[in-house]
Amino acid sequence: MEERILSLLENKEFGALKSVLSEINPADLVVYLEAIPKNKLLLVFRILPKELAAETFVEMDSDMQILLVTAFSDREIKDILSELFVDDAADIIEEMPASVANRILKQADAQTRRDINQILAYPEDSAGSIMTTEYFDLKKDMLVADAFSRIRKIGLDRETIYTCYVTDSRRKLLGVVTAKDLLLSRPDQTIEEIMEDNSIFVTTTDDRETVVQNFEKYDLLALPVVDRENRLVGIITVDDAIDVMQEEATEDIEKMAAMLPSDKTYLKTGVFETVKARIPWLLFLMLTATFTGWIISAFESKLAVQAVLIAFIPMIMNTGGNSGSQSSVTVIRAMSLGDIEFTDIIKVFFKEFRVSLICGLVLSVVNFVKIILLDNLIMNGEISYLVAFVVSLTILATVVFAKIVGCLLPIGAKKIGLDPTVMASPFITTLVDAVSLLIYFTIASSLLSL
Amino acid sequence: MEERILSLLENKEFGALKSVLSEINPADLVVYLEAIPKNKLLLVFRILPKELAAETFVEMDSDMQILLVTAFSDREIKDILSELFVDDAADIIEEMPASVANRILKQADAQTRRDINQILAYPEDSAGSIMTTEYFDLKKDMLVADAFSRIRKIGLDRETIYTCYVTDSRRKLLGVVTAKDLLLSRPDQTIEEIMEDNSIFVTTTDDRETVVQNFEKYDLLALPVVDRENRLVGIITVDDAIDVMQEEATEDIEKMAAMLPSDKTYLKTGVFETVKARIPWLLFLMLTATFTGWIISAFESKLAVQAVLIAFIPMIMNTGGNSGSQSSVTVIRAMSLGDIEFTDIIKVFFKEFRVSLICGLVLSVVNFVKIILLDNLIMNGEISYLVAFVVSLTILATVVFAKIVGCLLPIGAKKIGLDPTVMASPFITTLVDAVSLLIYFTIASSLLSL
């Protein structure tokens, strides 16, 4: 397909090109446009039918959008703006340099400009910043037949007509009617008769994590957003909720793996951007690992007496780190999904304590047997039962410590307003590393009388 | 609310109880039911209006479902089944012991039973296993007015009426019409006039990751599922896609943190189940860490000469491990989201190579300075410039190795049909641990002539 488009463009067969492009879905079309030489992009974009052009514009990355907007006439900007939903327009403008953003806003009519500015004013990651103001509203004394004529009149300009919101004269949210309810009712019924109370909504300042949890829990197609006075100001549609959901999961995964979150896809992120997202945590963790080095050198003279102890250091630290990140990651994910709250902290603590005891016991027994049977074979029998016991006891204590810290730190962090995800594996690993070494050397010093 | 329900139940005010419960959303109602004593659960459940009862039943965990089904009369099972969508029925039956499952299936009518069995027969994680057979279909010679009467007649039994599928007499998928299209068209237009070609579909055996990618890319409310002969056999609705999305992200996160995936929420998973999910990887990683122990003991005599080298082992291993999991986790997530495919392997390789060079250089320079200025202060100046250089060079080599392995292993694993997520941090960390020690000791041996 890509070659066909390029060859039609090459041969200037614009009529054929238009009919080929018009059949392509916006999300796929963007991929083809990326293959077109930059100096011909505007030409091709101008060929597209108006609606498809706007829908494709929304799907582009901001570099391509800026390239096009800079080349657009004021008339073209106006045309595209009139096809866009305001939440998409706000998303696009947010990524633009100020001068380009202002040029776009100047072409919007007063109402649209106000709506866009309103959305842009909400804090990032809030429900207000991802909502659209183009919802479909009804009054309770309307008839079902009136609702249908209203859909025919303004339905095209609304982001969804499948969930209709019933408001009073002061825009207070009274109830909700689905298009299915409308279709299955008699035309002479009133909206009040068929509407359902609406108890599910978010406020503009709610976190977008709350938005996602509502969609997941209640299987919604749209979620109403109200202001502090309980007036309906916008809605969030399910397609936007899905994007947020994937972004949040990706962000959590990136933070758990010691990276700063990025909002671009992998291949579109430049080398330096990638380095900038990765180097801060690598540096921080390398520098904090200095402590473990100091702990080891403080025990250096004792280690010289029992050199065999050194060989087990990596294994003890890894086992502690893995145990800790298992609990922290599980707890963080459960908090994101809304399965755990701060009030569950005691339950979580006891559960992790019991899990860590069992895991620790199994690991230390297996480790004891392994040292006696296997390591002794390789290391010419220089490991005594007592050393094996010291290592195994250290593993038990380390696993219990790591799992308790791993579950409590993220819950505590969230409670005091810190990001629980940053408390995940890498940070906890460093803490567990240092503590597990201290446990190891303390046990070894006393049992082996070093 | 919970107390109010319990006190109404206590005082046997069933009329009031019914009207209170009837106002509650199924997803919230389940939480209240969990607080009710088990011996009174059936009683309360029988009070609920039929439709709400069925919707609430779907939301329950399987323990509660089994408890109720065992106590149900055949008539009650039949009533609930008739209210359920077949994909929900299939989900429920899948979790039941065989005897209970058979009892439920016996109460289903022949068509429903066939549909349920069909869904159950598809491999887990396939599109077929999450679809429903209750889609809304139209023929191309119908009028828009006919479509509306069809919606009024059978719309209630369809999982969605917002996306209608146009099929021919052999059930081949011809096109798609949305409820919005219908509402905005004249009643005397034919479906053929207003339908759009449908190019977006999955086959029954496609992986559910593909399903999720389609929803995300094309902003769908429903996705058609066809069989090998391209006949429409079912649809997947967006609410089910959202559940799959969250499950897949949770599974990936669990696997990346060295756990076996679980399909229960954190607080509902028992201690032994949690141990069973965590201990296999802990054991495996503890045992493979044996190799790092052997490597260290093989160099023991050389380490005795330059004991200061020991102190840097944890820092080198951690830096390598963190660098590796940064790339592996990024690449795995990008593959899940469909941003990277096998054909991008060269691009990914070069990008990670450049990123690793820059990260490695920055880290080793900072490390060199830190050793000279800080560590030497703590360790009484016993670290020579040469040792600092050895450690820094090791860091550079380790970071480059870790990042390359971290990006290539998951892509390679997926290509040969292995689970890329299992290749993530824990597995790669173990590999990187061993290799980084070998690099360290090799560089140290030659530069320090040990």
Image: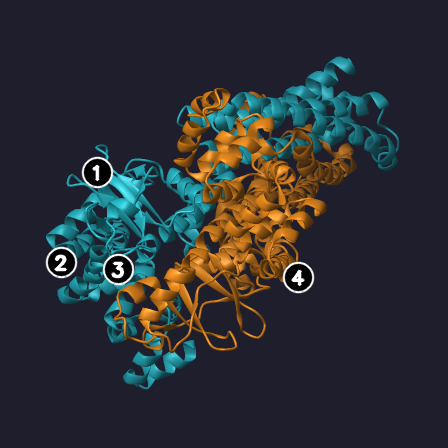
Chain colours: A cyan, B orange
Badge 1 amino acid? Lys
Q: Do residues under tags 2 and 3 come within 8 Å of each other at their CB atoms?
A: no
Q: Earlier in the sequence, mark 3 or mark 1?
A: 3
Q: Chain of mark 2?
A: A
Nearer to us: label 4 or label 1: 1
Say which mark, if any, is on residue A107: 2
Say which mark, if any, is on residue A172: 1
Q: Chain of mark 4?
A: B
Q: Are marks 4 and 1 on the same chain?
A: no
Badge 4 amino acid? Ile
**In what quadrant of the picture does the N terminus of chain A appear?**
bottom left
Identity of the residue furthest to the left in this view: A110
Q: Residue A260 placed where, x, y %?
A: 43, 41
Nearer to us: label 3 or label 4: 4
Q: Earlier in the sequence, mark 2 or mark 3?
A: 3
Badge 3 amino acid? Ile
Residue tagged 3 = A66
Nearer to us: label 2 or label 3: 2
Q: Residue A206 placed where, x, y %?
A: 33, 35
Q: Image check: A399 left or right of B54?
A: right
Q: Residues within 10 Å of mark 4 (few under 14, many from 20)?
A: few
Residue tagged 4 = B416
Q: Do residues under tags 1 and 2 come within 8 Å of each other at their CB atoms?
A: no
Work out whether A37 lies above or below A320: below
Q: Do residues under tags 4 and 1 come within 8 Å of each other at their CB atoms?
A: no
